[in-house]
Image (tube, rainbow, N blue to C red):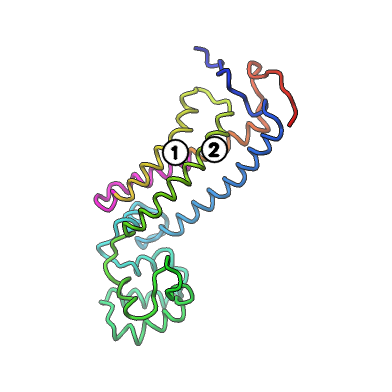
C-alpha cells in the first residue's frame, strides 16, 4: 500500500475552512498554556521532597508512599513550602522535628514561627490544606509520612482521568488532520497518552506497595508530555506554514 495514499475521509488542515483553522489555532494556544502551567504545578508540588533540587523518583515515592525517615511537615518544609519561611526559621523547625517534636519546645520555639509564617493559609479554614493551628493539629503532621491518603488519591484520580481524556481527545482530533508518515507512528502518538494516563494513575496506588512503580509514574508523565508536544508543534506548523505534497492538494473551498 502506497505511503502517499490517504483515507477517503482524510482532510488536511489547509483543506479546511478558515473558521476551523482559527478554531484549532485558538484551542492549541489555550490548551498548550494550560498544559505548561500543569507541568509547573506538578514540579512545584513534588520536587525537592527528598531534600535535593529537581524532580526525582525519590520525590515521587515520598509523595505517594511516604518516607520512613521523615514526616509530612518535613516533606513540606523541604519541598513545596521551602520558600515560605526564612532559611534559619525553616532549619529551626526541621531540627525540632528531628529531635522528637516535643510539646514544650513547640510552645516556646516553634509555635511563634508557625503563627508568623503559616497560619495565614493553614488556620483550618481550607479543608484541602493541613491545619497547623495548635498542638493537637501539629501532631498529625509530625507523625511518620505515609504519603498521599487513599481517599485523596481516589478523589484526584477520577478528576485526572476525565480531564486528561478530554484534553487528549481534543489534541488527537486536531492532530488527525496533520499529514504524518508512517501512519502507524501518527496513530501511536494519538493513542499513547490514553495508555499513559491509565498507567500513571494506577501506579499512584501501586507505588504505596512497591516503590518501583514510581518509575512508571515518571515515564508515563514524560511520555504524555512528549506526545502532547509532538501533536502541538506539528499541528500548529501544518495549519499555517506546511506546504502540502501535490497528491494532497484537492479542490479547496476557501470559505467559512
Callout 1: few (<14), some (14-19), or many (20+) C-alpha neighbours within 10 Å?
many
| Residue 208 screen position, x and y as percent | 27, 53
Asked if the residue under mark 2 is in contact with the one under mark 1, i.e. CB atoms within 8 Å, the reply is: yes
Residue 152 in the image: above or below residue 140: above
SS under mark 1: helix
Residue 171: assigned label: 2
- Please give the name of the residue rendered at 54% of the width and 26% of the height, measured from the top-left corner: 180
Helix, strand or loop status at disc 2: helix
Q: Position of residue 25 (x, y in %)?
A: 65, 39
Q: Residues within 10 Å of mark 2 (few under 14, many from 20)?
A: many
Distance of label 1 from label 2 (alpha carbons): 10 Å
Residue 220 among magenta residues: yes
Give residue 101's position: percent from left, percent from top.
28, 78
The residue at the point 73 percent across, 24 percent down is 253
* Image quadrant containing the C terminus: top right
Q: Is residue 17 above or below residue 139?
A: above
Q: Check disc 1 and report the residue beneath it.
A: 193
Most common SS among magenta residues: helix
Magenta residues, as a range? 206-226
The residue under the point 39% across, 73% down is: 131
Q: Is residue 118 above or below residue 224?
A: below
Amino acid at each position: 500500500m502506497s505511503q502517499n495514499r490517504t483515507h477517503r475521509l482524510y482532510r488536511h488542515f489547509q483543506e479546511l475552512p478558515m473558521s476551523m483553522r482559527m478554531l484549532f489555532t485558538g484551542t492549541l494556544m489555550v490548551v498548550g498554556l494550560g498544559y505548561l502551567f500543569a507541568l509547573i504545578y506538578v514540579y512545584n508540588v513534588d520536587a525537592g521532597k527528598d531534600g535535593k533540587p529537581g524532580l526525582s523518583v525519590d520525590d515521587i515515592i515520598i509523595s505517594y508512599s511516604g518516607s520512613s525517615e521523615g514526616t509530612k511537615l518535613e516533606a513540606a518544609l523541604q519541598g513545596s513550602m521551602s520558600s515560605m519561611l526564612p532559611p534559619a526559621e525553616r532549619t529551626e523547625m526541621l531540627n525540632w522535628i528531628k529531635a522528637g517534636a516535643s510539646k514544650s519546645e513547640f510552645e516556646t520555639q516553634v509555635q511563634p514561627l508557625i503563627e508568623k509564617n503559616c497560619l495565614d493559609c493553614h488556620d483550618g479554614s481550607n479543608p484541602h490544606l493541613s491545619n497547623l493551628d495548635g498542638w493537637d493539629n501539629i501532631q498529625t503532621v509530625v507523625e511518620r509520612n505515609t504519603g498521599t491518603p487513599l481517599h485523596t488519591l481516589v478523589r484526584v484520580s477520577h478528576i485526572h482521568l476525565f480531564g486528561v481524556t478530554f484534553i487528549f481527545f481534543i489534541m488527537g482530533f486536531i492532530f488527525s488532520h496533520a499529514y504524518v508518515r508512517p501512519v502507524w507512528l501518527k496513530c501511536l502518538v494519538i493513542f499513547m497518552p490514553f495508555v499513559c494516563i491509565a498507567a500513571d494513575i494506577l501506579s499512584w496506588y501501586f507505588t504505596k506497595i512497591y516503590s518501583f512503580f514510581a518509575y512508571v509514574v515518571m515515564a508515563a508523565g514524560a511520555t504524555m508530555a512528549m506526545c502532547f508536544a509532538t501533536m502541538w508543534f506539528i499541528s500548529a506548523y501544518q495549519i499555517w506554514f506546511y506546504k502540502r505534497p501535490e497528491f494532497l492538494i484537492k479542490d479547496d473551498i476557501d470559505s467559512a
